Amino acid sequence: MPLFQACGIAQFQLVQIHPFLDGNGRTARLLSTLWLYRTGYDFKKLFTISKYYDRDRAGYYRAIQEVRERGMDLTGWLEYFTEGLATQMREVQQRGESVIRRDLVLSKARRAGLKERPVSVLAFLLEQGKGMIAECEAALKQNRRTLQRDFKLLIEHGLVREMGTGATDPTKYYEPVL
């Protein structure tokens, strides 16, 4: 039997027999995570399946209930369980890729000889995804003229692009070039 199916079945069975007054779901999720860990899947605390269930509590309970309604056919539950694992793993991958991209862009800025102040502006944009001058002023405690010079420098180095219709556009914002 494939490992992920076995973990899903073990998790469901512990929820099904309900051996404790409280904490059966948490214990069942811990059991499946421990089983995965002991068989070589060390997620380094990067995710827990509980996060997936917390975001979709209704789906979690529905998947468990459907097993009972379908004569203990675990197919739907196992699909839900494996989709939860896959979703969490994709999120870890996306976060990892985002961190790597961020580090590469910041490294490129430092290699270009940029000082720490414009690099901190770039780091803010990478964290937020985009930013307007006013947002950067508030978050970074820098004045508008200094930020305008920093943005000009970042644009010249191809690290940031200006988005908006013109120099006086109140909706103008800046975003990092990834």
Image (spheres, rainbow, N blue to C red):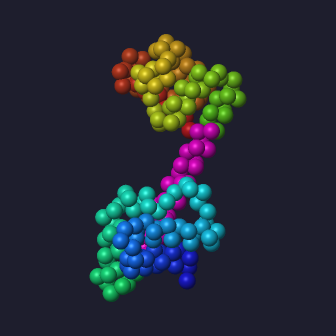
Residue 39 location, quadrant: bottom right
Percent position of residue 7, x then y: 51, 75
Q: Is residue 102 left or right of residue 23?
A: right
Judge whether residue 99 is colored magenta.
yes
Can residue 148 be seen at all in this image of the molecule?
Answer: no
Viewer-proximal residue, 27 or 139? 27
Judge whether residue 75 is colored magenta.
no
Percent position of residue 139, x then y: 46, 25
Can residue 56 be seen at all in this image of the molecule?
Answer: yes
Q: Which residues are magenta?
A: 78-103
- Spot the residue most to the top: 145
Q: Residue at x 31, y 71 (%)?
A: 62
Quadrant location of the C terminus? top right
Q: Residue at x 48, y 19 (%)?
A: 141
Viewer-proximal residue, 168 or 39? 39
Q: Is residue 12 left or right of residue 102?
A: left
Q: Up-down: is 95 above or below 164?
A: below
Magenta segment, prevailing SS (helix, strand or loop):
helix
Q: Up-down: is 6 above or below 142?
A: below
